[in-house]
């Protein structure tokens, strides 16, 4: 099993609206500083924070399936389909950009969110009608046992069924001293970002053990089925996990480093 831990210095960075909004990018664009620029159909992952109220004006998207996940605060989404909706903590908004649309975002001070791009087969995707849908927090299944809370964003029980790209997503919170086991599937990649927990945490596959902490990006790949154990050490841990195929059966957009 191959486990990588990439600190913030190995991830991309970008600022918006004169520095009102800044983003840490586990997977960014060319020239933004990320040592890893894509994982299979997982094309882009930005973790945005608003130091003060700000926004990003109308800009175009095409082809990609773009999920925004609210972590804290409130943001307004507008698009050329006529949508106006608010993204709040725990909500997911899904844009399937299809043949093309534009959107804009306005956020309050303290707003925090992810934006994640998944890549379907673009030759087919650009022929589809663009769509937007907002999924409220309470629609997603959660389990809470022995100090471990698991919210399924994409996967069994999720209300999101229309995605074309293959992905599973989980928002996992562990109280200090608790542990969580996640099944690793051959030929699939697990990408995880620790968004809370400065005390340091431990990840083990039964043979090798690595430590990680707040803001670290973890990538796990294996040619054999197995499990990884995640243990919160010192502080409460919150980690967002995305699982995708390591390779897909369609050509992917060539992304520059």
Image: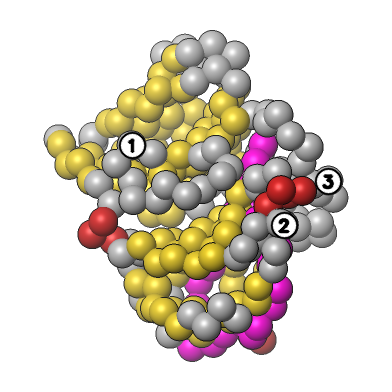
Label 2, label 1: how far apart the Cα atoms are = 28 Å
Residue beneath the point at 17% across and 42% down: 144
| Residue 90 image position (x, y, % from top left) | 33, 62
Mark 3 lies on a secondary structure that is loop
Query: Residue tagged by mark 1?
Result: 156
Mark positioned earlier in the residue sequence (2 or 3): 2
Residue 125 appears in the picture as rendered: yes
Please tell me in which quadrant of the rendered image residue 247 appears: top right
Query: Which label number is shown at residue 126?
Result: 2
- Element at label 1: loop
Between residue 47 and residue 85, name the one nearer to us: 85
Distance from disc 1 to disc 3, alpha carbons, whole Å, reads 31 Å
> Which residue: 81% across, 56% down?
30
Residue 61 sits inside the magenta stretch: yes
Q: Position of residue 85 (x, y in %)?
A: 41, 79
Residue 199: give x, y in percent of width and height: 36, 47
Image label count: 3
Circles 2, 1 touching at the beta carbon (< 8 Å)? no
Q: Which residue is labeled 3 in the image?
A: 254
Residue 157 horizontal/vertical position (percent): 29, 41
Q: CA distance from mark 2 to mark 3?
A: 16 Å
* Residue 219 occupies quadrant: top right
Q: Earlier in the sequence, mark 1 or mark 3?
A: 1
Bounds of the magenta span? 40-64
């Amino acid at each position: 099993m191959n486990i990588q831990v990439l600190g913030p210095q190995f991830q991309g960075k970008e600022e918006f609206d004169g520095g009102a909004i800044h983003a840490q990018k586990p997977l960014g664009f060319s020239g933004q500083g990320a040592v890893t620029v894509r994982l299979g159909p997982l094309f882009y992952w930005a973790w945005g924070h608003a130091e003060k109220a700000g926004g990003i004006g109308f800009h175009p998207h095409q082809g990609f399936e773009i999920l925004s996940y609210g972590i804290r605060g409130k943001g307004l989404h507008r698009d050329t389909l006529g949508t106006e909706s608010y993204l709040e903590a725990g909500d997911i908004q899904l844009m399937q950009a299809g043949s093309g649309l534009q959107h804009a975002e306005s956020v309050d001070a303290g707003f925090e969110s992810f934006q994640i791009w998944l890549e379907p087969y673009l030759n087919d995707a650009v022929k589809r009608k663009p769509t937007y849908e907002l999924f409220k927090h309470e629609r997603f299944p959660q389990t809470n046992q022995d100090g471990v809370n698991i919210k399924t964003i994409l996967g069994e029980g999720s209300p999101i069924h229309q995605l074309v790209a293959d992905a599973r997503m989980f928002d996992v919170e562990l109280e200090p001293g608790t542990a969580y086991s996640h099944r690793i599937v051959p030929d699939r990649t697990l990408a995880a970002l620790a968004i809370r927990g400065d005390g340091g945490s431990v990840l083990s596959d039964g043979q090798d053990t690595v430590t990680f902490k707040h803001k670290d990006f973890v990538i796990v790949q294996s040619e054999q089925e197995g499990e990884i154990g995640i243990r919160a050490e010192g502080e409460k841990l919150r980690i967002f996990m995305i699982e995708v195929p390591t390779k897909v059966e369609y050509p992917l957009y060539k992304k520059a480093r």
